[in-house]
Image (tube, coloured by chain):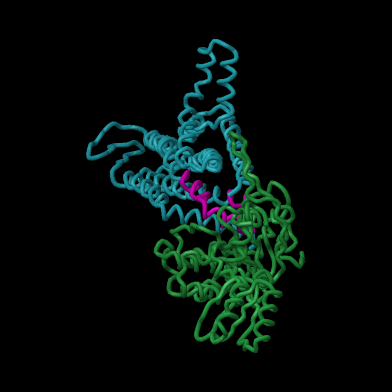
Chain colours: A cyan, B green
Amino acid sequence: MTDALMATGALIRDTFREALARKIFWGLFGLSLVMILFFLFILKIDIVEGGVATVSLFGGTSNRTQDVDRIVRGVYGGIATFLYTWGMFLSVFASSGLIASVLEPGRIELLVSKPVSRTHILLGRYAGNVLVVSCNVIFLVLGIWTILGLKTGIWSGTFLISIATTIFIFAVLLGVVVLTGVLFESTALSTMVTVALMIMSPILAQTGLMMRLLSSEWSRGIWRTLYYSLPKVYDMGKMTLDAIQSRTFSGFMPIWTSALFGAVMLSAALAVFSRRDF
Amino acid sequence: MQSEYAIETTGLAKVYRSRWTRREVRAVDGISLRVPRGTIFGLLGPNGAGKTTFVKLLLSAVHPTEGNALIFGRNANDPEARRPIGYLPENHRFPTYFTGAGMLDFYAALSGLDSPSRKKLIPEMLELVGLKDWGNVRLGKYSKGMLQRIGLAQALIHSPSMLILDEPTDGVDPVGRRHMREILSRFEEKGVTIFINSHLLVEVELFCREVAILDKGKVALSGNLHDLRAGKGYRLTIASQTPETLLDQLRAKATSAAARDGMVDLQFATREQVNEAVDLLRSQRCDIEALVPTTSTLEEVFVRTVEK
């Protein structure tokens, strides 16, 4: 194994170790487990000839005959929405501490004194964070997918897309966490800035409506600039939902513009980190 | 890259500027210093002299405003220049979620040690620093002295060619200090350069061969410790039965005089003064018990240097 790979492995293991010690990993894991257990024990579906005979939830039973596929896709859509809102918020909240902690005086000096470049150190930490969240997302999505598959006999692969899209948008937002972390060394500020971007996303996504409502060309220009340059958490969530519901979606622009934003954030963070004195 | 110097700095400076007022603070002000390979070098200075900034410049934790630093002939900015260095920082904060062994494993991996070597060396290092039974205990349970020792172990684990130790005995009890000195002596015998930044003058005096005293970001004094301490004066010891009038004459020439066990110790500042005293004593056929050149303590050298 080369020195670079060994150092990367050590940095990723260290991030996991810290996430476990801070109960971040277990917190996310516990939440995922609760959701999986919810679907395992609370939701009961009886199927007769391809249709739902009864749906039982919290002891209440419905006898409406519905298409199993629609129910399953609805549940998948709900989970994907949860992942894109509360799941993402919790992940950002959990990860912001993992970036700021590594910059603590007395810790960072020793880290940068090792024969590893600063770019390598920050990217190793970044990768560790993404992997911590990825483990939980994979656990949650695969868990629910397996349970619903076993209960309904429907194995819809499109739900698994939410693993990739959730991890992707988290990786983009983590770029913001890392940049604000290396600039200000504040967990609270990193969380605030990132959550603010998440909140702005559904508002900015109303571009069509706003183009009609805004009176001046420059204000429309500002809106468009903000929409195209900031990460599209809402659009990505909608794309995932559309994929799960087998609806068509309009282009891949949200993916590449968000990826570009994440790359710019991460590059800026690396540049700041490389120039900083500790 | 081969170089006869472990550390070589040329006009190294670090200027901190206030973001709003643009006021400048020259933490390190044009330091040119050479530390030969295999030396035990002590860096001294009052608080705020720029010692820690200088160490951080060597490790590239701080970027220089002017000048450059070479580590074994390689630019300090190059991560490879840090490979032969083992560093123990001042006021370190090792993550408390680590066990002793886990912490050594992490930093050894970053230093380029492969997994089989780490597995072999970790128990050896724990034993070396007297923490053999503490390897599986979290660092949160360690005392300050134990943290210093595990810190020393992480600095040593990859067999560095140079150790940079910032206040290494801070928080360590006298027995622990002695143990640390013994460990460092073993590495000195192997030819490892040891660079110690310490405010404990006694520690430096006991251990270092070369020193530099920093003051206001500049090197105020540097050289071989023996040479720096030499040249304080001479101590003349005579019997207390020496006639009182003669003793009075000698006391007048001496910088100090002290009686002990039937003897009188007279301290003279220069060779001329002590020669005059000897001539006086011999002219009156008085016995001289001893005449020895005396040296300054490092503390005296330090105080003289920074109070200039």
Instruction: Classify residue A100 as left or right of residue A64.
Output: right
Q: Residue at x 57, y 54 (%)?
A: A109
Q: Residue at x 51, y 43 (%)?
A: A185
Q: From the image, which quarter does the N terminus of chain A lie in?
A: bottom right
Identify the residue at image location x=61%, y=42%: A272
Can residue A243 be seen in this snapshot?
no
Q: At which x and y percent is residue A132? A: 48, 50
Question: Does residue B65 sit above or below B81 in this rendering?
Answer: above
Q: Is residue A110 magenta?
A: yes
Q: Name the one closer to the observer, A230 or B216.
A: B216
Find residue B129 and report its horizontal and vertical position in percent: 50, 73
Total number of numbered discs in the rendering = 0
In the image, is residue A113 part of the stretch drawn in magenta?
yes
Question: Is the magenta region chiefly helix, strand or loop?
Answer: helix
Examine the rendered structure and indicate whether residue B230 appears above or below residue B54: below
Please state the extent of the stretch shown in magenta in the rendering. A95-123
In the drawing, does residue A58 fall left or right of residue A11?
left
| Spot occupied by residue A8 in the image (x, y as percentages of width and height) | 59, 56
- The answer to whether any part of residue A85 appears in the image is yes
Question: In the visual, does B131 lie left or right of B266?
Answer: left
Give the farthest residue toward the top. Answer: A215
